[in-house]
Amino acid sequence: MTRQVLDPVHPDGARPSWLAPLTGRVGAEVRGVHLCPDLDEQTHERLHVALLRHKVLFFRAQHHLDAAGLEAFARLLGDTAVHPELDDWHTDASFSLYPPRFGIAHATEAPARGDGPPPDTARSGGETEWADTAAAYDGLPVELRELADRLWVVHTGPAETEHPLVRVHPETRERALLLGGFGWRVAGLSEEADSAALLRLFQDHVTRPENTVRWRWSPGDVALWDNRATQHRAVAGPGGRPRHSRHLAIGGETPIAVDGRRSVPR
C-alpha cells in the first residue's frame, strides 16, 4: 500500500516534539497546546496541517474550556452546528448535502483510568474509536477501487442525500470512502441484498484494525477530527461511570466524486 499524498507535517521524516502519532496511519496526541479562541496564527496553521495528516488530534487536560470557550475555539474552524449522533460507525451528518468539515468533542466528565471496562455508548462511555477512510480506500485492491469510484450511496437521516462512495478531499486531494451508519443503500441497485453486501464489503475495509485509533477519555480531553476522511463510534462494553461531553460540528462542503460530480439531495 502507498499513501496518496506526501506527509505535510514532517515531509523530511523529522517528528515535531509537540506531536505524538498514536498509530502508523491515524491519530496523534498534541502536547503543550492550550486551546482558546485567540490561538496564534502559527499554532493554528500547525494544527490544521497536522489534522489533515493524522485525521484526528487529541488534546489532554483542556479543563479551562467551558461551553462558550469551546464554541469560540470551534468558530476559528468555521460555522458551528449540532447534528444527531449514532452509536455505531458513522461520519457525522452524512445524510446532509453539506456534511460537517470537522467534529470536536470535549469531555467534561469521564470514567477514571482503571475504573473497569468501557461503558456502552459514546455519550455515556469511556472510549471512542476513529477510522481513517482515506487509508481504507488506499488499501483496497485495484479492482475494488475501480468499482468504488463508480458507486453512489444514499444516506438517510433527517434529510436524504446521494453521495459518491468515494469523495475527493478538497484540501489533500486524497480519495476517501464515504459510508457509515447513515449510508443506507447503493444507488441504482434494485436488489436490497446486493446493496447490503456491497456496503458491508467496503465498510469492513474502513474498520480494519490497522486503519483505526482508540482513545480512552479523561476529564478535560478534547478530540478534533476531519469528518471528511474519518468515521467514529463508541466502543461498546458494560459498566463504568458516565461520560458527559460537548460535541460540535463545523460546517462543510458538498462532497465531490472522482469524476467531478457533486452529491445531490433526494
Image (cartoon, rainbow, N blue to C red):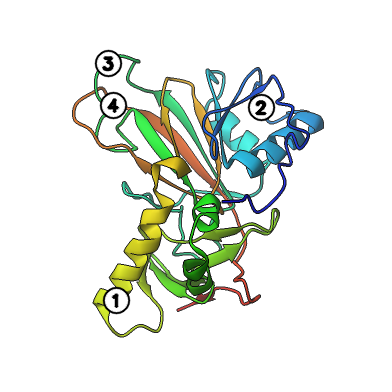
Q: Residue at x 42, y 20 (%)?
A: 218
Residue 214's disc is none
Q: Residue at x 55, y 42 (%)?
A: 225
Tell me which label, 2 or 1, sits earlier in the chain.
2
Q: Nearer the viewer, mark 4 or mark 3?
A: 3
Quadrant that contains the C terminus: bottom left
Task: Give the labeled residue for mark 4.
Answer: 242
Task: Give the labeled residue for mark 2.
Answer: 36
> Which of the 4 quarters of the picture holds residue 224?
top right
Q: Amino acid at mark 3?
A: Asp
Q: Residue at x 44, y 64 (%)?
A: 95
Q: Around disc 3, counting alpha carbons within 10 Å, would you say few (fewer than 14), some (14 to 19), or many (20 or more)?
A: few
Q: Around disc 4, counting alpha carbons within 10 Å, would you say few (fewer than 14), some (14 to 19), or many (20 or more)?
A: some
Tell me which label, 4 or 3, sits earlier in the chain.
3
Q: Nearer the viewer, mark 4 or mark 1?
A: 1
Q: Nearer the viewer, residue 200 or 160?
A: 200
- Disc 2 element: loop
Q: Nearer the viewer, residue 35 or 68?
A: 35
Left or right, residue 132 beside residue 48: left
Check contact, mark 4 vs mark 3: CB within 8 A: no
Task: State the CA–CA distance, disc 4 to disc 1.
Answer: 39 Å
Percent from the top left, x then y, of residue 122? 34, 38
Q: Is residue 173 above or below residue 59?
A: below
Q: Is residue 107 above or below residue 81?
A: above
Residue 194's disc is 1
Task: State the CA–CA distance, disc 4 to disc 2.
Answer: 26 Å
Residue 249 visible, this orientation: yes
> Which of the 4 quarters of the picture holds residue 219?
top left
